Amino acid sequence: MTAPRYTDLVQSLPATVPFVGPEEQERARGAPFRARLGANESLFGPSPAAVKAMQAEVLEIWKYGDPGSHDLRHELARHMRARPENILVGEGIDGLLGNLVRLLIGPGDAVVTSDGAYPTFNYHVTGFGGALYKVPYRDDHEDPAALFRKAKEVNARLVYLANPDNPMGTWHSGETIMAALDDLPESCLLVLDEAYVEFAPQGTAAPIEADDPRIIRMRTFSKAYGMAGARIGYAIGAPDLIRSFDKIRNHFGMNRVAQAGALAALQDAAWLTHVQEQVAGARDRITGLAADNGLSALPSATNFVAVDCGGDGAFASRVLDELVARGVFVRKPFVPPQDRCIRISCGRVQDLDVLAETLPEALAAARS
Amino acid sequence: MTAPRYTDLVQSLPATVPFVGPEEQERARGAPFRARLGANESLFGPSPAAVKAMQAEVLEIWKYGDPGSHDLRHELARHMRARPENILVGEGIDGLLGNLVRLLIGPGDAVVTSDGAYPTFNYHVTGFGGALYKVPYRDDHEDPAALFRKAKEVNARLVYLANPDNPMGTWHSGETIMAALDDLPESCLLVLDEAYVEFAPQGTAAPIEADDPRIIRMRTFSKAYGMAGARIGYAIGAPDLIRSFDKIRNHFGMNRVAQAGALAALQDAAWLTHVQEQVAGARDRITGLAADNGLSALPSATNFVAVDCGGDGAFASRVLDELVARGVFVRKPFVPPQDRCIRISCGRVQDLDVLAETLPEALAAARS
């Protein structure tokens, strides 16, 4: 009786996981968090119309979801000024990234990203055997020109860029992205992760044609729409590319409550505006709290703020640990020099009250 | 400006999809179905306790689900007389099968299944480049001994067996499965799909030790628990195998409403009994309706009945088309000789009333 025979690739993979969830941390510390500010979830919640739609749809849960997400896809096409053929609905950006990597990347194929950018993208690339090349951040921003230069140098099939960026919250104007695209090598696909774009200033979303075969954009209902637990996102790209996902995706993989909620959320523009206002206010307050404690916050176009703890990565880790010990769930960048920061999600007043109470203590403890 | 560079494997894949959803058929015919009896969904719905739990959890949807599905996994372990380390929660059996194939199967690796068994499993095997070997059904049953012989012959890494079977509804006793296991080749993993086992007679579930490294079992909340649209299922296997999924799975892929609903559903044994009784009654009625129309129904241990239309596959296809034209969503086996049947899900009284009304017309039309 012997073990199963894994593929050579799987045998070579580490057993590490991209992130530890807050629930596991809560079980480890034996108490719930007082403020959940680590995963850039929207503490302002989803649209009440989306809540109503989801609760109603629970009664239909005995039916599989529509594998084509027809109604949502058509609504998204209107929303994005694209055609339904340009849109793919999937199990969050994480799920979409996994399938995208699977389409393009086999063992040894080159992929370019920023050093310290989204770990789950890297996880998928490694998981399919791709060779990751990393370009440093430049002044806490991802560096499109350097990314595309590196892509040319290594003959990359795929390059990842988030705008706005996670974990730093910084951003480029859409014009900057468009100008940089001239240097994207031929037959290298850009995946432009716009998970946070609804929080960014006008003009941050690059005015990319949906049919442009060089780029696939990804957006989500997890952030501004407040539905992280629903696992629903979408990709916008050229029809050939969008259709190619049909060769490999889990066709009946969508939760139908999520589909219904996303459709209702998309139609509630007023709630989105409300959340954007709340997030802007919370960003200001986090920035102020940082200043009150002698720290500097980075400008952010997202629903989180990277706060520079004023020391090295080890010091920021101590600050983080002390916050976690005081019931504040936060995360931080992994890679120097960005790892001098902790990353704090935009919470409600009561969440940031907890932060205001605990941050001075955490800093004092980290310094002692 | 050129197209993305897909992997050689992806370029070789067909653009076909395993199933067309009923919603797409409804859009094509311009009217909703009167009876939805094609996807073996549970028209009796989920437990009212699960509905309540899901509606309450919608208010928490702003949070990502627990990537470890801790509470559900522990409850499933109790339910399956296993340890939590034996259990993996995933996005339905479809999602779990995809990840299982990815763990074990690379280009050219041999996989064995029955000719006419679950197409989505074949889709995943083809999608990872595996070489599929198919064994015929024997008297409308999957043939474990022949499957395992073939697995030995072709040095298979993975063999698929559903008990009870879909699409025929037939089954083997757990004892038969256990006896056949003696001939499972070393280091060939058996994936035993028990999606329908809750509908089967006592003794159908093979008494497999959760730690047995030769077998991974898969079960779902889509069928007896009435939550197909939630996309949640689970695998039971040896801890090493279960842990290996952590190398590749989409860790934050679970919908948290689905997690909450599954936990509540699992704890409502009375509702499961109620559904089992309703399904048994519906099976009897479908069998009677078949006889009333001069057809014979196969004995079933599932929530559907394969009805032998008394002719060849082409005739059964005509019957199916005529039922669909009359607003009855049904499906049928693809492969001779099982394709002489149509597959009818166990509906409620009102659904089977529609079947009773339309089946004589559909048969008459198919014969004319």
Image (tube, coloured by chain):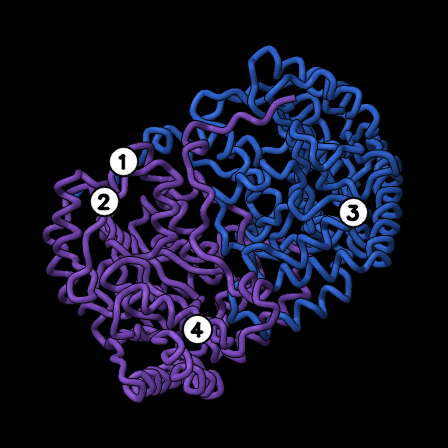
Chain colours: A purple, B blue
**Hey, what amino acid is under mark 4?**
Glu
Corner quadrant of residue A218: bottom left
Quarter holding the C terminus of chain A is: bottom left
Q: Chain of mark 3?
A: B
**Hey, what amino acid is under mark 2?**
Tyr
Label 1 Cα crowd, 10 Å radius (few <14 / some 14-19 / many 20+): some
Label 4 Cα crowd, 10 Å radius (few <14 / some 14-19 / many 20+): many
Height in image: B217 above or below B34? above
Q: Chain of mark 4?
A: A
Would you say A284 lies left or right of B178 here? Answer: left
Q: Chain of mark 2?
A: A
Residue highlighted by disc 2: A133
| Residue most extreme to the top | B153
Instruction: Identify the mark at residue A322; answer none if there is no mark.
Output: 4
Would you say A196 lies left or right of B241 here? Answer: left
Quarter holding the N terminus of chain A is: top right
Dot 2 lies on which element?
A: strand
How far separated are the C-alphas under marks 4 and 1? 41 Å
